[in-house]
Amino acid sequence: MTASGDPPEQASHREAPAGLSLVATPIGNLGDLSPRALQVLGAADAVLCEDTRVTGQLLARHGMSAPLLPLHDHNESEMVPRILERLRQGQRLALASDAGTPLVSDPGYRLVRAVIEAGLPVTAVPGPNAAVVALTLSGLPPHPFLFLGFLPPRAGPRAAAIGTLRAAERAGLAATIVLHEAPHRLAETLAALAEGLGADRPGAVARELTKRFEEVRRGSLAELATHYAAAEARGEICIVVGPAPEEAPGAEDLDTRLRAAMREASLRDAAAMVAAATGLPRKQVYARALELAKEGG
């Protein structure tokens, strides 16, 4: 019995919420593991993790141990039914990534969807996230922002993905972009971003965040690409790209936007939407919409 009169197991479970808990872990500095994260990890019936060695070492550093179950991209589908059964039996499980917040470029999405669809409880212990830390240190507009994870590793698909992003920007997307990248691909990815989004676009490269050799380098995409073509980059890396500059649409671009909008809305509403998106005077856009309607679109 404990001092409160509860059996030890019940007292332990007070620190682990019912169901599945998503627990953020340090991205470098071990001091960033929160007291509540420690409580939940230590009191869980089992901890799901990418690499049992990494999570086991983390727990051991804090004098704790817990049953560890591997959950990664290669076994998540087959593990989901087993985990759901354990949750239905009333077990309290925690999910931890090797570093950072679960599901954000890490395994766990399929599991969380299954837990929600099964009507079982899921909660989170917030904490470190490399993308958000990089965003706040970049000196670029913090919101809105778009997190894209990793771009395709091969040159062709990567250029296509950047082209799709640029098309979205031309259609009105204005957001700071946050990416992950591997050290050996950093220079070529920066060069591809400079070519596809504009050499003068402001950006930042953040690496080894929260660690001893933390570095945040800021400059244009072209400047960053040139620097990392000559300087070796190590550690975990985030790339942050500033939002696209506002562009005054040309006549052809305005017509394209109006035609697309007029297919989905009335002439008046289409003109209002395009005027809002482009910043052009509403009367000017409405007049052009009338002309296009008379021409047959």
Image (spheres, rainbow, N blue to C red):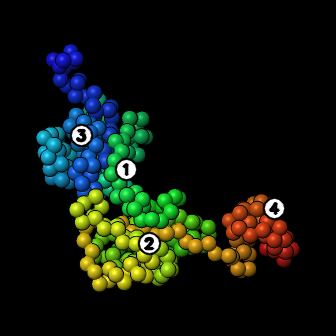
Q: How far apart are marks 3 and 4 (CA)?
A: 58 Å
Q: Do the residues labelled 2 and 4 touch (CB within 8 Å)?
A: no
Dot 4, crowdedness within 10 Å: few (<14), some or many (≥20)? some
Q: Which of marks 4 and 1 is nearer the N terminus?
A: 1
Residue 91, label in figure: none
Label 4, secondary structure: give it. helix
Label 4 belongs to which residue? Answer: 268
What amino acid is found at the position of numbered circle 2 in the picture?
Answer: Gly
Q: How far apart are marks 4 and 1 (CA)?
A: 43 Å
Q: Earlier in the sequence, mark 3 or mark 2?
A: 3
Residue sitting nearer the eye, 71 or 226: 226
What amino acid is found at the position of numbered circle 1 in the picture?
Answer: Arg
Q: Earlier in the sequence, mark 2 or mark 1?
A: 1
Position of residue 134 in the picture relative to residue 95 (left or right)? right
What amino acid is found at the position of numbered circle 3 in the picture?
Answer: Leu
Label 3 belongs to which residue? Answer: 38
The residue at 17%/19% (across/down) is 2
Q: Which of marks 2 and 4 is nearer the N terminus?
A: 2
Dot 2, crowdedness within 10 Å: few (<14), some or many (≥20)? many
Residue 203, label in figure: 2
Label 2, secondary structure: give it. strand
Q: Position of residue 295 (x, y in %)?
A: 84, 77
Label 1 belongs to which residue? Answer: 110
Position of residue 82 in the picture relative to residue 195 (left or right)? left
What amino acid is found at the position of numbered circle 4 in the picture?
Answer: Arg
Q: Do the residues labelled 3 and 2 touch (CB within 8 Å)?
A: no
